[in-house]
Amino acid sequence: MSKEDISDNEVDEELNEINNNLSNLNVPKIPAKYVRPVSPVATRRWKIPKPETAIIIALSSRALFDMTEERKIYSEQGLSSYLKHMISRENEPLKPGSAFPFVQALTCINLRLLELDPNEKHLFDVVLMSNNSAQIGVALINSINYHALTIERICLTAGKSVTGYLAAYGTDLYLSADSDNVVEALNEGIAAATVFSGDGAVQSSCEQLRIAFDGDAVLFSDESEIIAKEHGLTKFFENEAEKADQPLEIGPLQKFAMVLGDVKKKFTDRGIIENCPIRTYLVTARSAASSGLRALRTLRLWGLDIDEALFLAGAPKGPILEKIKPHLFFDDQKRNVDSGLEYGVKAAHVPYGIAQKHTGK
């Protein structure tokens, strides 16, 4: 639910009604398996990352779990029915959502890092940021424990936007199913993207995190895309040829990509290259010969080592993404996101830049 859906007074009234009737709800006793299940994570060394040194990944409950059914109840029947439904079924685990494999892969990387150095402090820390109420927190924590996820920090805001907390948590990446919250985060200078319901048909490996980035308006600014959208491809190619030696400005996900690159270097600097648990991709609509040089030189200047660069010259991205099987693919253009989703890929929309004004092109 977004902050525009309900007022604070409505939230308070609905929550008071639920609280007054909790005794009438048939909530089964919490099974022992929800306390903390035995898992591969539990049998290997694990520690809670310290916020001041961690890489903070914030995500909403609908990004982590598939809450399609629950969302439908809220939309069609209102807040009260939604709360009653969630509380009455709080001991039934929620199904994995689109960002679930991504979170699992982050845990695998943390464990690999701790194997390299038991004192490693530069770990991924996943924070669940939800505008659900504290009443729903029981269901969320039960599901986190059932799926053996290592999520220890949760922020529940009862209908208010979580955006104000993102900077306070030191967020490096924010994923949400609410596009309005994502836009707010981007406006605050926080890397963010909208993810979509479902768990995706293409299964991603937990042992290697694969992240695919679009170039313009994602890793790079939209400075060149503005020329392409407003003046055509001929002017775009001329501009890129003239500025081939001038780096592009940074885009909304550049800092996250750099942080990811820093973690990757912890493995590659030790000679772990072929079996590195992180692999990154540039999947761009740019043409290689006519506009690829500037993109690659920009990445080199930043010191950002992208494993694979795919210049598609405007071809559909879906078939390529199906082959890559990324945990997440970030793109600013909805048609490219839709192309990925069509092939079962977990594609995330970055609503940034000139493409948001030219959705039909």
Image (cartoon, grey):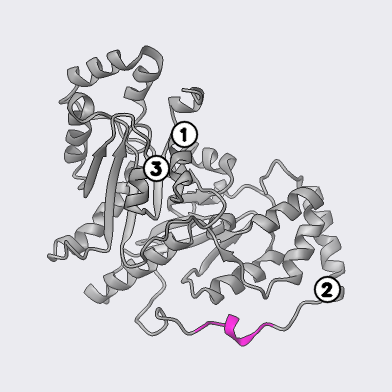
**What's the CA distance linking mark 1 and mark 2?**
45 Å
Query: Which secondary structure lies at badge 3?
Result: helix
The mark lying in front, picked from 1 and 2, is 1
Residue stretch in magenta: 30-37
Residue 280 point in image, percent of width and height: 28, 51
User: Can residue 21 be seen in this snapshot?
Assistant: yes
Q: Earlier in the sequence, mark 1 or mark 3?
A: 3
Q: Amino acid at mark 3?
A: Gly
Residue 123 point in image, percent of width and height: 34, 65
Query: Which secondary structure lies at badge 1?
Result: helix
Residue that carries the numbered disc 2 in the rendered image: 25
Looking at the image, residue 129 sits to the left or right of residue 81; the answer is left
Q: Amino acid at mark 1?
A: Arg
Question: Looking at this view, is 255 or 360 the one in front?
Answer: 360
The mark lying in front, picked from 2 and 3, is 3
Q: Is residue 247 above or below residue 143?
A: above
Residue that carries the numbered disc 3 in the rendered image: 318
Query: Which secondary structure lies at badge 2?
Result: loop
Magenta: main secondary structure equals loop
The mark lying in front, picked from 1 and 3, is 3
Q: Earlier in the sequence, mark 2 or mark 3?
A: 2
Q: Residue at x 42, y 57 (%)?
A: 56
Q: Residue at x 65, y 69 (%)?
A: 139
Q: Amino acid at mark 2?
A: Leu
Q: Quadrant of residue 248?
A: top left
Residue that carries the numbered disc 1 in the rendered image: 335
